[in-house]
Amino acid sequence: MKREQSNIRNFCIIAHIDHGKSTLADRMLELTGTVEKRAMKEQLLDRMDLEREKGITIKLAPVRMQYKEHQLNLIDTPGHVDFSYEVSRSLQACEGALLVIDASQGIQAQTLANVYLAMEADLTIIPVLNKIDLPAADVDRVSREVISLLGCKKEDILLVSAKNGVGIDKVLDTVIDLVPPPTGTSDQPLRALIFDSYYDDYRGVILYARIIDGNLRKEAPLRMMATGAEGIALEVGSLSPAMKPNKQLETSEIGYIVTNLRSTREAKVGDTITNAKNPATAALPGYKHVKPFVYAGLFPESNEDYQDLKDGIEKLALSDSALQFTPENSPVLGFGMRVGFLGLLHMDIVRERLEREYDLSLITTTPSTNYQITMEDDTELEIKSATDLPDPAQVKEIREPWVRGEVVVPKTYVGEVIQLIARKRGVQKNISYMDAELALIAFDAPLANLLTDFYDQLKSVTSGFGSFNYELSGYYAEDLVKLDFYVAGERIDALSTMVHSSEAEPLGRETVAKLKEVIPKQNFQVALQAGIGGRIIARENIKGFRKDVTAKLYGGDVTRRKKLLEKQKKGKARMKRFGKVDIPSEAFTALLKRE
């Protein structure tokens, strides 16, 4: 059925992690009769087990609802900073956004980041206070925060309890009243915005798209304007939330397109779809190539599982165009993969999916970032691991990525947060107060120092109240050195890391002390060392087991005793030369948790 554009509303839900946006979407699906009561389950739009367990949205999900003679297209977006580009593309596909805020927690850093994205996209923002039924809910305080942020009136804020279904009809009525209908021209060549894509084992690449201009018929030839890939629309339709095929997608509608493409790398998020026979002249603005900036080595505990790891990553990469990987070989860990991620949450999700879906036990090396290098002959290099660093004598300059971060925190914790930022080599920029209780601290800091455990430490010093959001600001030249670690005189490349020269010695001492705890004793003394170039800056010794070889002596000449001890000494010296130290997997997480 063709629907007038004036009766279409495209909107999304934006929120911080765990503020209840997926539960709100569930109640909307129930109220509009999109999903029957008997087919309903919690977090219906979160399809992955991981999403349900962690209580977060990882993959966004669009759904079409019919309500009061209007077609409502909803996109449930991820809330985490790692997926902010996907969120920005989803916002481009909409005219309105529901800003969901937990009435007990108030505004948090990722909420702010997504509000800024929504304002940039010029969307109508409807504030919604969720979880008003909780004993800890403080509606007045959180309302003041929202009024301060959006400049709205108190009566504009909708009060709901998604869990109990309170106020949901008012939310849908407000969407119809306040969100403007889409504008698009049906007689122009096809232009559609891809806001998500995934790979289906049986059907190939499936795209979620918003038709901006023109319309898209089944079997139409397609061209992706950024990647140049061409394919065919094997099936088009809407999601409710199951796939519902139609003959065509009309102007301004949101739906799915089943293609014959083989990988999401051919149809990336943000790309513009056009008709290959009658192409549009200009692509939609805003597309960018998403580059990973967190890298880690993934190694199977048993080398027999390497092929399973390789197959697993290749399959995940079909659905996740941001995932980049290359084979890696370590003398200690054997064969594995060097994988690039969008952030630490992205890394955790990929690792957990590999372990669950492919039954793997993995060792993850310390996450690092990429560095830009200028050589003495002015050639430019980019390295993704400290082991790739060329001879320091040939290097003119090393640039590391810095981020612009924001921490939202109750004002009583401001001092602790500023001290934490300073310990991470960060520079505090300014502090603004959103209301009498809530402070926003803006700062710049090197990304590498935030990768390991900044988030855990922030939660610790703010008693769990602090929230954090960041974006890449650029690459800056710093006095960086490569810190190597040696076990029994053998350099362990998988432990090498890039650090600022001022932090090298404390980090070296801290790490060798931790390695001493996790590497088991041998029959000979084992030296643990940290060094820069050939210069050793920290050392610990693991004492060898001591076997009493003189226990069997019952008196006699002292020379017999000396002879046995000399023989033992020679044996230990030989062992030290040829003995192999087995390094357990815990040693590779020693750098992950700093004091």
Image: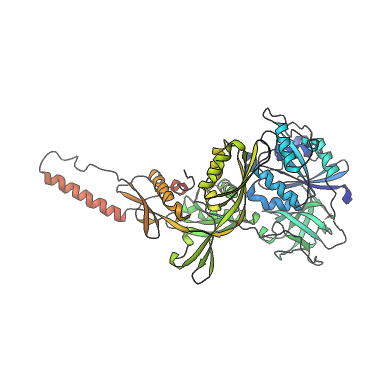
Task: Residue lying at the far bottom in this picture: please name it.
Answer: 377
- Residue 463's quadrant in the figure? top right
Residue at position x 71%, y 52% from top?
88
In percent of width and height, residue 444 lies at 58, 51
Relative height, residue 73 to residue 263 (above, below)? above
Residue at position x 42%, y 57% from top?
331
- Can residue 175 be seen here? The reply is yes
Residue at position x 45%, y 55% from top?
501
- Can residue 333 be seen here? The reply is no
Pick the front one: 462 or 190: 462
Q: Please tell me how many numbered marks the rendered image carries.
A: 0
In percent of width and height, residue 342 lies at 61, 53
Task: Residue lying at the far top in this picture: please name it.
Answer: 135
Relative height, residue 476 to residue 568 (above, below)? below
Q: Is residue 467 left or right of residue 394?
A: right
In percent of width and height, residue 108 lies at 66, 41
Relative height, residue 53 to residue 486 (above, below)? above
Residue at position x 49%, y 47% from top?
592
In percent of width and height, residue 320 lies at 64, 54
Q: Is residue 176 left or right of residue 448?
A: right
Pick the front one: 365 or 262: 365
- Residue 136's quadrant in the figure? top right
Q: Is residue 135 left or right of residue 314?
A: right
Relative height, residue 462 to residue 487 (above, below)? above
